[in-house]
DNA sequence: CCTACCGATCGGTAGG
DNA sequence: CCTACCGATCGGTAGG
């Protein structure tokens, strides 16, 4: 049946819905930077005019907020599960790293954006606050694992936490989904290096 | 003698020389982002007018270029010495990591800027090219260390290189010179974690 | 009255 | 190093 068919005439291109516009926006924000990207750039990328963008979103900052929420919601789920989960702190820490890598890969555009904001506006400051909450939960997990005797105690736990998640977060700078490594391989390699080290014969 | 004394009247504040303006500019660029920082912002920060900035520099991009050159010159020295140096690849790799951390701490503002550029202009693209050259030399060093049998060979060397220097570079996101850790402590901790791992009893 | 837009232009501010 | 400006472009919105 051809009932409830789509509009006949080309009342607009194939159909840039809200999600498609957001994807294009986040992609541009990451390539050029949020401030260096104009709504005009975004419109040109999508082959529409500038006002067409404002049909879908109230403001440029609205686009940023939705992208940051996507990243933060995903990461919050992973970290909350790890903090509330069962098992040793060590096992939960390995697990949260593995899952964080998977989130970084699956939601790389929005996570990349999250890791680059500077707190210039209320939206950015709100996102930074949620990010600090995540960092605090992860630092707790590291402290617990050290207290359990599972991790080396000759380096301050807060320093361990910073370096460990600095390594995880650095993924967004170079990982390419079309490249050689899939998410699980990278996650496995990262966990192995972080816990057993690079030197030969540690495992 | 009071000869060649400074100008009598307040022909400007204490004396914003080129270096002082550059320092303030890099600081603002890092706090707000390069694009979000206006020359007017910089002038206000220094307590002068906007044209006063252009007395010291030809353009906003000029400020960026000088800062990026500072970071790149320092890192190039460290990496060149490591690549041409004597000793095993393993020893040279440990050494270049240690020295890189020291450069990141001593030149944090300019290195931070370097790690955040997106390649929007010719100046940024030129800096990214020099940065890729550094990354390539470091990746070579890791490959050599793996070939020597000094590093684990169950993870692709390029992946090792990315993760290792991702951890190093993440320093700029949180290190504070006025904080608890000095450069040498952080460098020691990072090298220990990277090579021996986080799990207890590896060393 | 809805949706998905367009051509033109608003008030302000950017780097220079 | 300041006052006084420029060409252009910004994010956002009018009527249709």
Image (cartoon, coloured by chain):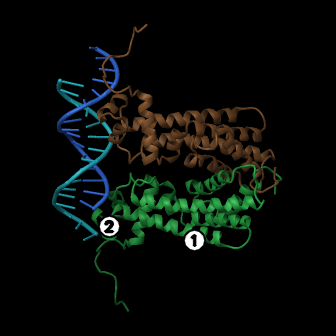
Chain colours: A brown, B green, C blue, D cyan
Neighbor class of circle 1 (other Cα within 10 Å; few <14, some 14-19, many 20+) is few
- In the figure, is residue A114 to the left or right of B148? left
Between residue A1 and residue D13, name the one nearer to us.
A1
Between residue B71 and residue B79, name the one nearer to us.
B79
Q: Quadrant of residue A61?
A: top left
Q: Is residue B145 above or below residue D9?
A: below
- Choose mark 2 or mark 1, whichever is in front: 1
Question: Residue, x 28% and y 77% (percent of image)?
Answer: B9
Q: Is residue C5 above or below residue B135?
A: above
Between residue C10 and residue A7, name the one nearer to us.
A7
Q: Quadrant of residue B45?
A: bottom left
Q: Does residue B177 appear anywhere in the picture?
A: no
Question: Residue, x 42% and y 38% (percent of image)?
Answer: A25
Q: Is residue A128 above or below residue C1?
A: below
For disc 2, the chain is B
Q: How many marks?
A: 2
Q: Secondary structure at mark 2?
A: loop
Q: Secondary structure at mark 1?
A: helix
User: Which residue is identified by label 1?
Assistant: B77
User: Which residue is identified by label 2?
Assistant: B58
Neighbor class of circle 2 (other Cα within 10 Å; few <14, some 14-19, many 20+) is few
Residue A153, image x and y in percent? 77, 53
Q: Quadrant of the N terminus of chain A?
A: top left
Residue B147, image x and y in percent? 74, 59
Q: Which mark is residue B50?
A: none
């Amino acid at each position: 049946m051809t009932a409830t068919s789509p509009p006949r005439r080309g009342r607009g291109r194939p159909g840039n819905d809200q999600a498609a516009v957001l994807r294009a926006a986040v992609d541009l924000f990451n390539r050029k930077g949020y401030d260096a990207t104009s709504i005009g750039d975004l419109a040109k990328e999508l082959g529409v005019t500038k006002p067409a963008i404002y049909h879908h979103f109230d403001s440029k900052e609205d686009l940023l907020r939705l992208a940051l929420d996507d990243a933060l919601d995903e990461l919050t789920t992973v970290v909350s599960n790890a903090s509330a989960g069962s098992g040793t702190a060590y096992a939960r820490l390995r697990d949260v790293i593995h899952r964080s890598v998977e989130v970084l890969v699956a939601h790389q555009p929005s996570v990349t954006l999250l890791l680059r904001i500077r707190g210039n506006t209320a939206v950015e400051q709100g996102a930074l606050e949620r990010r600090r909450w995540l960092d605090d939960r992860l630092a707790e997990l590291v402290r617990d694992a050290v207290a359990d005797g599972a991790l080396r105690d000759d380096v301050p736990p807060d320093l361990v936490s910073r370096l460990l998640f600095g390594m995880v977060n650095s993924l967004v700078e170079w990982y390419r989904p079309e490249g050689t490594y899939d998410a699980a391989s990278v996650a496995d390699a990262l966990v192995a290096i972080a816990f057993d080290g690079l030197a030969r014969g540690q495992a």
